[in-house]
Image: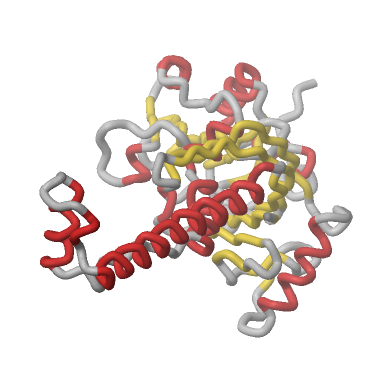
């Protein structure tokens, strides 16, 4: 017998509730064709909600499906493939049809179901934000043009293009330029060494934890593919490998639990709002906490096209 509801959600969302919903014919087709399970209601506080979030075994949301009583249509809400036009961001991500077979053909033709959870995470661009923030902490050196007047630059240009020999320049000018060159070389060395240090942070698999509107967590690890341009600026960040598991608690994880305990102690200085059964996942505290090796990222409200489950993420660096 096909499982309709993810095991982690089975205690709070009876399969009978899914079966009795008007959207069940669509849900049944998606579950059978794409090996999905219901991961919860998109609006869990609304008992009349006919929108259900879908995932694979890993628990990462790959779309929402249901039936609109007001419009009389089946609909599928994508998390990765917006339409070119729409009245709003939500409308652009939502595909509708009165006839179920027509909607199923659209889902297949447009490839609205992501092939893997890595496609979802790369679409959200979380890791680009994380890596960029870490780099900004370690790459704040620039080459100042202070001290070089127009006359100084003119003098250097005459030497560079052979109009004047360097030996004809005053000794104090030569010393001034040599000092500036040494400073610039030091800046280059500092950039390289600091960026290499940042790369080392991301060379190993990164553990992460996510909490969303289902009231449960996703935990796992990922390996990143990071590219820099010739000036050591961040060029591209992609998740190359990833593991994910939907769980009700993370407190049995020997690596994650101690870090979350330290984060709670720090966040408690300014906030007393925490989520999860044990109350250890902070609602606030977004940003890079370098002393703990933790980056917290929120994805609710308008950001990331209002991802359906409104997750918050914590990355352990």
Residue 36 picture location, percent across and down: 65, 27
Residue 97 visible to the viewer: yes
| Residue at 33% across, 38% down | 92
Residue placed at 57% from the left, 35% from the top?
Answer: 225
**132, above or below 29, in the image:** below
Residue 213 lies left or right of residue 191; in this view the side is: right
Residue 87, percent from left and from top: 25, 43
* Labels in figure, total: 0
Q: Quadrant of residue 46?
A: bottom right
**Residue 156 placement: quadrant:** bottom left
Q: Where 288 falls versus 21 (above or below)?
A: below
x%, y% of residue 134?
54, 58
Asked which quadrant contains residue 119, the reply is top right
Camera-side residue of 139 and 81:
139
Q: Quadrant of the N terminus?
A: top right
Q: Is 128 left or right of 224, judged from the image as shown?
A: left
Q: At which x and y percent is residue 95?
A: 39, 30
Colour approach in the figure = secondary structure
Judge from the rendering whether residue 83 lies leftward or rightward of residue 223; answer left or right.
Answer: left
Which residue appears at 48% of the width and 44% of the height?
125
Q: Which of the two residues, 237 or 257, is positioned nearer the viewer here? A: 237
Q: Residue at x 73, y 43 (%)?
A: 220
């Amino acid at each position: 017998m096909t499982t309709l509801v993810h095991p982690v959600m089975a205690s709070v969302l009876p399969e009978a509730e899914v079966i009795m919903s008007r959207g069940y014919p669509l849900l049944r087709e998606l579950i059978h064709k794409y090996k999905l399970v219901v991961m919860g209601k998109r609006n869990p506080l609304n008992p009349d909600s006919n929108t259900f979030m879908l995932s694979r075994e890993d628990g990462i949301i790959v779309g929402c499906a249901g039936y609109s009583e007001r419009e009389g249509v089946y609909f599928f809400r994508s998390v990765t493939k917006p339409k070119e036009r729409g009245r709003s961001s939500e409308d652009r991500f939502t595909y509708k049809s009165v006839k179920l077979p027509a909607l199923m053909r659209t889902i297949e033709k447009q490839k609205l179901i992501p092939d893997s959870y890595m496609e979802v995470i790369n679409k959200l661009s979380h890791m680009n934000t994380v890596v960029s923030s870490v780099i900004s902490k370690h790459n704040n050196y620039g080459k100042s043009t202070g001290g070089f007047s127009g006359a100084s630059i003119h003098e250097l240009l005459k030497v560079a293009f052979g109009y004047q020999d360097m030996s004809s320049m005053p000794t104090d000018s030569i010393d001034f330029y040599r000092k500036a060159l040494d400073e610039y070389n030091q800046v280059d060395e500092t950039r390289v060494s600091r960026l290499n240090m940042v790369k080392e942070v991301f060379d190993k698999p990164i553990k992460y934890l996510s909490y969303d509107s289902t009231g449960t967590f996703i935990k796992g690890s990922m390996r990143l593919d990071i590219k820099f341009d010739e000036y050591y600026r961040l060029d591209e960040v992609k998740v190359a490998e990833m593991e994910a598991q939907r769980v009700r608690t993370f407190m049995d994880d020997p690596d994650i639990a101690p870090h979350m305990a330290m984060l709670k102690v720090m966040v408690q200085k300014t906030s007393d709002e925490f989520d999860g059964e044990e109350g250890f996942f902070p609602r606030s505290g977004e940003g890079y906490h370098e002393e703990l090796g933790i980056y917290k990222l929120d994805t609710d409200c308008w950001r990331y096209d209002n991802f359906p489950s409104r997750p918050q993420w914590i990355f352990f660096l």
